[in-house]
Image (cartoon, grey):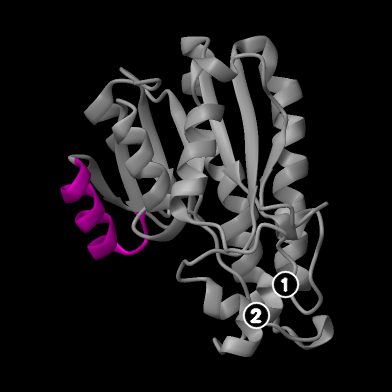
Amino acid sequence: MRLKGKTAIITGAGSGFGAGIARKFVAEGAQVMIADINGDGATEIAAELGGIAQVVDVANGNSVAEMTKAAMDAFGRIDIMVNNAGVTHLPGPLEEISEADFDRVLAVNAKSVFLTAHEIVPLMKAAKTGTILNVASTAGVSPRPNLNWYNASKGWMITATRTMAVELAPFGIRVNAINPVAGETPLLQTFMGEDTPEIRAKFLSTIPIGRFSTPEDMGNAAAFLCSDEASMITGVAMEVDGGRCI
């Protein structure tokens, strides 16, 4: 029960890695808000876990403000903010990715971190404690070709994590990231372009442990980094990747 008594907002928690993090947090004693643009997914996971569902567009400031207010109304405080929501563009030469796809990737993967910080950091500063976890990617460390602007957005998240950690440490706020490798989530087919045995084998050949990341893998890493056991850890981007980045 390493998160007993803690409250958490987890974005993109209606499926995939976010749902895995939410399940682990509840198992470790936390109260969770399942925030997702997919209201049905959020409601389903919240019902399963006894959490609170919240529809949010993480790229919209008003929507993020509403999410924050709903969490404060429900919990009275926000101990943990997990920025997990993310999107990618289909694989393709960097100069052929549309401006609309670029804007969407940067809005969801990067601007969202700014927006949640804008709303939640003042609350954590007032409480003199808090933990922020950004779900980045191995793509920000060891990028694959043809996912250029997605890679860049995740590199941005890693740098944001480090600079937030340095600035917020004096206020009792820790900021870390996790870097998953591709996993069995709704984004997997988008990463690959198409889901065939040959393309899966090619992806898996780059992961020494020989399997994709799972939501449980992400939940375990996230629970540790957001717990008091990691009280001396801030500014790290932990690779949870089966050796992909070695």
Q: x, y percentage for residue 13? A: 38, 52
**Residue placed under numbered mark 1 in the picture:** 205
Q: Amino acid at mark 1?
A: Ser
Residue 100 in view:
no
Residue at 53% over, 25% down: 131
| Secondary element type, mark 2 | helix
Q: Is residue 66 above or below residue 201?
A: above
Q: Is residue 167 above or below residue 115?
A: above
The single residue placed furthest to the front in the displayed view is: 209
Horizontal relation, residue 238 to residue 43: left or right:
right
**Residue placed under numbered mark 2 in the picture:** 201
Q: Which residues are magenta?
A: 36-49
Q: Residues within 10 Å of mark 2 (few under 14, many from 20)?
A: few
- Nearer the observer, 209 or 141: 209
Q: Amino acid at mark 2?
A: Ala
- Nearer the observer, 166 or 187: 187
